[in-house]
Amino acid sequence: MENNYSTQESDQKSLELTDLSFDFLKETAKWAKFLSILGFIGIALMVIFAIFIGVFLSMLSASFTQSSPFAVAPGLFSLIYLVLAALYACPVYFLYKFSINTRDALNARNSDLLTEGLRYLKSHYKFIGIMMIVLFALYIVVIIGAIVVGIAAATLS
Protein backbone atom coordinates (compact mmCIF):
# COMPACT_ATOMS: atom_id res chain seq x y z
CA MET A 1 0.00 0.00 0.00
CA GLU A 2 1.39 3.37 -1.00
CA ASN A 3 1.25 6.36 1.33
CA ASN A 4 0.19 9.70 -0.06
CA TYR A 5 1.38 12.95 1.45
CA SER A 6 -1.03 15.69 0.50
CA THR A 7 -1.50 19.38 0.93
CA GLN A 8 -4.73 21.25 0.38
CA GLU A 9 -5.29 24.89 -0.40
CA SER A 10 -8.35 26.93 0.48
CA ASP A 11 -9.87 26.44 -2.99
CA GLN A 12 -9.77 22.64 -2.57
CA LYS A 13 -6.89 22.02 -4.99
CA SER A 14 -4.64 19.32 -3.68
CA LEU A 15 -1.23 17.95 -4.42
CA GLU A 16 -0.34 14.45 -3.40
CA LEU A 17 3.20 13.32 -2.83
CA THR A 18 3.32 9.56 -3.35
CA ASP A 19 5.96 7.31 -1.83
CA LEU A 20 7.70 7.15 -5.20
CA SER A 21 7.77 10.92 -5.67
CA PHE A 22 8.88 11.26 -2.03
CA ASP A 23 11.78 8.87 -2.76
CA PHE A 24 12.64 10.74 -5.97
CA LEU A 25 12.83 14.04 -4.07
CA LYS A 26 14.93 12.44 -1.34
CA GLU A 27 17.39 11.02 -3.88
CA THR A 28 17.45 14.33 -5.79
CA ALA A 29 18.34 16.13 -2.56
CA LYS A 30 21.22 13.70 -1.97
CA TRP A 31 22.61 14.22 -5.48
CA ALA A 32 22.15 17.98 -5.17
CA LYS A 33 24.17 17.94 -1.96
CA PHE A 34 26.90 15.86 -3.60
CA LEU A 35 27.08 18.20 -6.61
CA SER A 36 27.07 21.30 -4.40
CA ILE A 37 29.94 19.94 -2.30
CA LEU A 38 31.87 19.27 -5.52
CA GLY A 39 31.00 22.83 -6.56
CA PHE A 40 32.40 24.23 -3.31
CA ILE A 41 35.58 22.20 -3.85
CA GLY A 42 35.78 23.59 -7.40
CA ILE A 43 35.39 27.13 -6.07
CA ALA A 44 38.19 26.55 -3.56
CA LEU A 45 40.42 25.22 -6.35
CA MET A 46 39.60 28.29 -8.48
CA VAL A 47 40.61 30.60 -5.63
CA ILE A 48 43.84 28.65 -5.07
CA PHE A 49 44.54 28.75 -8.81
CA ALA A 50 43.86 32.50 -8.87
CA ILE A 51 46.45 33.03 -6.16
CA PHE A 52 48.93 30.67 -7.83
CA ILE A 53 48.56 32.23 -11.28
CA GLY A 54 48.93 35.72 -9.81
CA VAL A 55 52.19 34.82 -8.11
CA PHE A 56 53.48 32.85 -11.10
CA LEU A 57 52.68 35.58 -13.63
CA SER A 58 54.16 38.30 -11.45
CA MET A 59 57.42 36.34 -11.28
CA LEU A 60 57.26 35.67 -15.02
CA SER A 61 56.47 39.27 -16.00
CA ALA A 62 59.41 40.52 -13.95
CA SER A 63 61.74 38.65 -16.31
CA PHE A 64 60.31 40.33 -19.44
CA THR A 65 60.51 43.94 -20.52
CA GLN A 66 57.34 46.05 -20.58
CA SER A 67 57.25 46.00 -24.40
CA SER A 68 57.30 42.21 -24.52
CA PRO A 69 54.02 40.53 -25.46
CA PHE A 70 54.56 38.19 -22.51
CA ALA A 71 54.50 41.04 -20.00
CA VAL A 72 50.95 40.79 -18.69
CA ALA A 73 49.15 42.28 -15.75
CA PRO A 74 49.42 39.41 -13.25
CA GLY A 75 46.52 40.66 -11.19
CA LEU A 76 44.18 40.57 -14.19
CA PHE A 77 44.11 36.78 -14.45
CA SER A 78 43.75 36.43 -10.70
CA LEU A 79 40.88 38.89 -10.72
CA ILE A 80 39.14 37.05 -13.56
CA TYR A 81 39.35 33.74 -11.71
CA LEU A 82 38.16 35.30 -8.46
CA VAL A 83 35.17 36.88 -10.25
CA LEU A 84 34.34 33.54 -11.89
CA ALA A 85 34.61 31.79 -8.51
CA ALA A 86 32.25 34.36 -6.98
CA LEU A 87 29.77 33.92 -9.84
CA TYR A 88 29.95 30.15 -9.50
CA ALA A 89 29.39 30.39 -5.73
CA CYS A 90 25.82 31.67 -6.08
CA PRO A 91 24.25 28.73 -7.93
CA VAL A 92 26.28 26.24 -5.87
CA TYR A 93 25.01 27.84 -2.65
CA PHE A 94 21.42 27.75 -3.94
CA LEU A 95 21.81 24.07 -4.84
CA TYR A 96 23.25 23.30 -1.41
CA LYS A 97 20.39 25.10 0.36
CA PHE A 98 17.88 23.20 -1.81
CA SER A 99 19.42 19.89 -0.79
CA ILE A 100 19.52 20.69 2.93
CA ASN A 101 16.01 22.16 3.12
CA THR A 102 14.49 19.41 0.99
CA ARG A 103 16.16 16.67 3.04
CA ASP A 104 15.00 18.27 6.29
CA ALA A 105 11.49 18.81 4.91
CA LEU A 106 11.14 15.19 3.84
CA ASN A 107 12.46 13.90 7.16
CA ALA A 108 10.13 16.14 9.17
CA ARG A 109 7.21 16.04 6.70
CA ASN A 110 7.31 19.85 6.76
CA SER A 111 5.77 21.56 3.73
CA ASP A 112 7.19 24.97 4.68
CA LEU A 113 10.74 23.62 4.52
CA LEU A 114 9.96 21.91 1.22
CA THR A 115 8.66 25.19 -0.15
CA GLU A 116 11.85 26.92 0.98
CA GLY A 117 13.95 24.18 -0.62
CA LEU A 118 12.07 24.49 -3.89
CA ARG A 119 12.53 28.28 -3.74
CA TYR A 120 16.29 27.71 -3.65
CA LEU A 121 16.04 25.29 -6.57
CA LYS A 122 14.12 27.94 -8.54
CA SER A 123 16.81 30.50 -7.68
CA HIS A 124 19.49 28.07 -8.80
CA TYR A 125 17.93 27.53 -12.21
CA LYS A 126 17.04 31.20 -12.62
CA PHE A 127 20.67 32.19 -11.94
CA ILE A 128 21.97 29.56 -14.38
CA GLY A 129 19.46 30.70 -17.01
CA ILE A 130 20.47 34.35 -16.70
CA MET A 131 24.14 33.37 -16.86
CA MET A 132 23.47 31.42 -20.07
CA ILE A 133 21.67 34.40 -21.65
CA VAL A 134 24.60 36.66 -20.76
CA LEU A 135 27.09 34.09 -22.07
CA PHE A 136 25.27 33.70 -25.39
CA ALA A 137 25.03 37.48 -25.76
CA LEU A 138 28.77 37.68 -25.10
CA TYR A 139 29.40 34.99 -27.72
CA ILE A 140 27.39 36.96 -30.27
CA VAL A 141 29.33 40.16 -29.50
CA VAL A 142 32.66 38.31 -29.78
CA ILE A 143 31.67 36.64 -33.07
CA ILE A 144 30.50 39.94 -34.56
CA GLY A 145 33.68 41.62 -33.32
CA ALA A 146 35.83 38.88 -34.86
CA ILE A 147 34.01 39.25 -38.18
CA VAL A 148 34.47 43.05 -38.15
CA VAL A 149 38.17 42.72 -37.27
CA GLY A 150 38.61 40.07 -39.97
CA ILE A 151 36.94 42.23 -42.60
CA ALA A 152 38.98 45.27 -41.50
CA ALA A 153 42.21 43.28 -41.64
CA ALA A 154 41.36 41.93 -45.09
CA THR A 155 40.60 45.37 -46.49
CA LEU A 156 43.75 46.94 -45.06
CA SER A 157 46.12 44.39 -46.55
Image (tube, grey):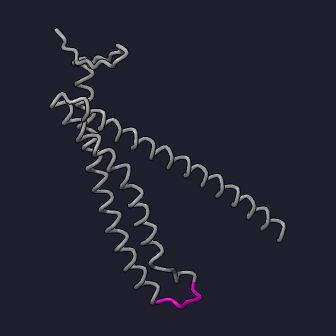
Give the main secondary structure of the magenta stretch.
loop
Question: Is 108 placed above or below 82 here?
Answer: above
Observer-nearest of 21 and 78: 21
Image coordinates of residue 83 in percent, x first then y, are: 43, 64
Q: Which of 114 and 44 is in front in this view?
A: 114
In the image, is 87 to the left or to the right of 26? right
Give the residue at x 22% y 25%: 23
Asked if residue 143 is among those painted magenta in the image, a careful observer would answer: no
At 52% from the left edge and 83% from the top edge, which residue is drawn? Answer: 71
Query: Which quarter of the rendered picture does the N terminus lie within?
Result: top left
Is residue 138 rendered to the left or right of residue 34? right
Q: Which of 128 and 109 is in front in this view?
A: 109
- Comparing 76 with 148, the one in front is 76
Does 3 appear above or below 83? above
Q: In x, y percent, where is residue 17?
A: 27, 19
**Vertical position of residue 14 compared to residue 136: above or below:** above
Seen at 23% across and 41% down, the residue is 100
Look at the image and tell me in which quarter the C terminus lies. bottom right
Q: In this view, does 31 lie to the left or right of 61?
A: left
Can you name the residue that lies furthest to the top here?
1
x%, y% of residue 21?
Answer: 27, 21
Q: What stretch is highlighted in magenta?
A: 63-68
In this picture, is 4 found above or below 57? Answer: above
